[in-house]
């Protein structure tokens, strides 16, 4: 082939042909760009205030074409032309669990979730929150009451609230929608759950292949939005045709005691102790709230003489920013508050979780240790005997205690309620956003010494950021060696205290999750079947089936 272009004579016919070819290519390329742009536009027609405004960044993280989190080879990870905007202020990182799923960026290992050289993930244990949902009944009712009160005053609103004069609440069927997954828009919980399924399928397909001929269980606590999330996830991970995977629903009934995914519903003392139990989080929230909300009320009241707003009402307004973003992709409510006020709201949400079931609650660690202990035991037994994949779907109120038990976001002091503790580890926005998930990955690594014996480590993926465990991070990629991990969990169990005793349950009440085990495991402990179950038996269904 003659490569010397200078000497190639191009005939007019060939020239014409080349021109046509080139215009065709140009045409196709521009058509593709147009198509892409319209898809992006359709998904989010009004890039709202405070959402970063490059084309890429207005999409939910899981649709962006930077490939963080997909577990791809580094070459593909860097394929994005998009500047890294992680340093930029982003409202989604200040919504305190009321916002869409976001990656953890604070205090995570550099280099992302890439598996360390010489290692392979041989087990994955996930605990995931349900996907993006509408407000709960209580929070939603507070919003509606507030809006009704403002409307019925008949006054025209001015200043930062002027938009309210022709603003509609983000659902016209609250009774139907409250508590449920959001099913429309770029941040719908259904889309996010499905995408997560596909994302993890990409990451763990080698594990799924190993159990294709077996019957694999995954679990959800007995609540619609959690079950729906698990089913959409299942469709993404296992596929529609899989007859190999089955969703098992674990009752939230209090009679389940320790044999539960939702210890916050079964720990009697936690529910009844009105001082330091479940309500403690609210007590602390109210106290912190009082330090910053009155100033906001004053500002808004000055703009609208005659209007009077309580702490709880301003807090509801801040909550509406997150929920409206979930439903509509953007929200005018976000504009009402300054960045400083957003960091105060963010901290308020940290305070409630920290004290409601987290590190600051005396029952939190014991409740969370149930799943942690069972999972640590499974990790010790290994994938050959108990299988490689464990997916559990729950509420944030169940993940928070597990993290408290693990002590992974333990701060040097309890969160103060008179001022923001800036350097805290406990940041709800990045720990339990909607769809928030923690994955324990067991790593099987070939040691440098070239001995054939594999070494086992465990690492912690929190919303696709690897978080080292303090005091146990000297393995590859800051992972924790298996033996150290087991020792560590045991020690945490001693700190947590005995679940039954602490919770005021009978000494023979179930004290651990027995269902969390693949049916094909060695030595299946048939505890679940033997025990007399007072309420309904765990209901079983396939994720694609009807309920
Ligand atoms: C889990 O709990 C059981 C029973 O209390 C205990 O024997 C076991 O050592 C615990 N495992 C870990 C890893 O802490």
Image (cartoon, grey):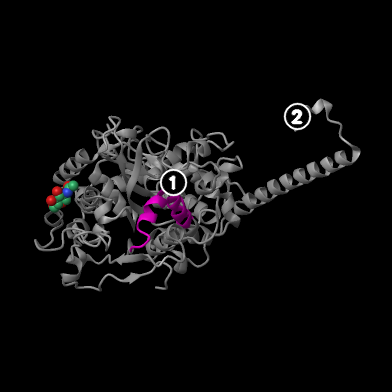
The residue nearer to you, when weighing 172 against 267, is 267
Residue at position x 31%, y 53% from top?
388
Q: Where in the figure is residue 104, as x and y percent of width and height?
A: 41, 41
Asked if disc 2 and disc 1 are in contact, CB closer than 8 Å, the reply is: no
Q: Residues within 10 Å of mark 1 (few under 14, many from 20)?
A: many
Residue 256: x %, y % from top left: 21, 65
The quarter in which the C terminus is drawn is bottom left
Q: Which residue is mark 2?
A: 3
Closer mark to the observer between disc 2 and disc 1: 2
Q: Residue furthest right?
A: 12
Q: Quadrant of the N terminus?
A: top right
On the picture, is 536 further left or further right than 189? left
* Residue 227 x %, y %: 38, 64
Q: Quadrant of residue 111?
A: top left
Please identify the quarter of the rendering in which residue 510 is found: bottom left
448 and 47: which is toward the camera: 448
The residue tagged 1 is: 95
The percent coordinates of residue 517 (x first, y second) are: 25, 59
Is residue 205 magenta-colored? yes
**Is the stretch drawn in magenta largely helix, strand or loop?**
helix
Magenta highlight range = 192-214
Whether residue 359 appears in this view of the structure is no
Helix, strand or loop at label 2? It is loop
- Farthest front residue? 1
Give how far apart the Cα atoms at labels 2 and 1 are. 60 Å
Q: Above or below — where is 544 with respect to 136?
A: below
Q: Residues within 10 Å of mark 2 (few under 14, many from 20)?
A: few
Q: Is residue 518 above or below residue 87?
A: below
The residue at the point 27 percent across, 70 percent down is 538
User: Is residue 197 rendered magenta in the image?
Assistant: yes
Horizontally, residue 361 falls left or right of residue 502, namely: right
Q: Secondary structure beneath disc 1?
A: loop
């Amino acid at each position: 082939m003659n490569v010397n272009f200078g000497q190639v004579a191009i005939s007019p016919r060939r020239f014409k042909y080349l021109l046509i070819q080139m215009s065709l290519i140009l045409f196709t390329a521009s058509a593709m760009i147009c198509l892409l742009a319209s898809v992006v536009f359709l998904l989010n027609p009004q890039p709202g205030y405070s959402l970063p405004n490059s084309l890429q960044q207005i999409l939910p993280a899981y649709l962006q074409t930077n490939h963080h989190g997909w577990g791809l080879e580094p070459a593909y990870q860097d394929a994005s032309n998009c500047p890294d905007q992680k340093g930029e202020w982003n409202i989604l990182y200040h919504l305190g669990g009321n916002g869409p799923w976001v990656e953890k960026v604070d205090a995570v290992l550099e280099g992302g979730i890439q598996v360390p050289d010489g290692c392979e993930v041989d087990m994955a244990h996930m605990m995931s929150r349900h996907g993006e949902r509408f407000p709960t009944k209580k929070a939603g009712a507070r919003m509606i009451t507030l809006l009704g009160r403002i409307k019925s005053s008949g006054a025209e609103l001015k200043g930062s609230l002027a938009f309210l004069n022709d603003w509609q609440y983000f659902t016209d069927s609250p009774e139907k929608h409250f508590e449920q997954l959001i099913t429309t828009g770029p941040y719908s919980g259904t889309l996010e759950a499905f995408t997560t399924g596909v994302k993890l399928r990409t990451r763990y397909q080698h594990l799924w292949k190993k159990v294709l001929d077996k019957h694999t269980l995954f679990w959800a606590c007995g609540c619609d939005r959690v079950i729906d999330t698990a089913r959409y996830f299942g469709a993404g991970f296992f596929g529609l045709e899989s007859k190999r995977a089955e969703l098992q629903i674990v009752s939230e009934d209090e009679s389940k005691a320790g044999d539960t995914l939702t210890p916050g519903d079964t720990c009697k003392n936690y529910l009844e102790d009105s001082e330091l139990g479940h309500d403690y989080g609210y007590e602390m929230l109210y106290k912190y709230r009082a330090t910053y909300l009155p100033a906001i009320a004053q500002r808004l009241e000055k703009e609208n003489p005659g209007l009077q707003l309580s702490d709880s009402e301003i807090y509801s307004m801040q909550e509406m920013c997150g929920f409206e973003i979930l439903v509509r992709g953007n929200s005018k409510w976000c504009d009402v508050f300054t960045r400083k006020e957003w960091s105060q709201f963010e901290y308020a949400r940290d305070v409630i979780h920290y004290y409601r079931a987290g590190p600051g609650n005396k029952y939190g660690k014991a409740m969370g240790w149930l799943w942690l202990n069972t999972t640590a035991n499974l990790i010790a037994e290994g994938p050959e005997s108990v299988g490689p994949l464990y997916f559990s779907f729950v509420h944030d109120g169940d993940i928070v205690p597990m993290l408290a038990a693990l002590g992974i976001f333990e701060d040097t002091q309890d969160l103060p309620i008179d001022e923001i503790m800036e350097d805290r580890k406990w940041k709800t926005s990045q720990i339990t956003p909607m769809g928030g998930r923690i994955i324990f990955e067991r790593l099987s690594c070939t040691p440098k010494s070239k001995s054939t014996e594999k070494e086992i480590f465990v690492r912690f993926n929190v919303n696709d950021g690897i978080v080292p465990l303090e005091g146990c991070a000297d393995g590859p990629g800051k992972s924790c060696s298996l033996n150290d991990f087991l020792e560590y969990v045991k020690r945490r169990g001693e700190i947590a205290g005995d679940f039954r005793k602490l919770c005021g349950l009978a000494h023979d009440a179930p004290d651990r999750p027995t269902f969390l085990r693949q049916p094909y495991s060695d030595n299946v402990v048939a505890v679940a079947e033997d025990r007399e179950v007072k309420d309904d038996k765990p209901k079983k269904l396939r994720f694609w089936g009807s309920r």
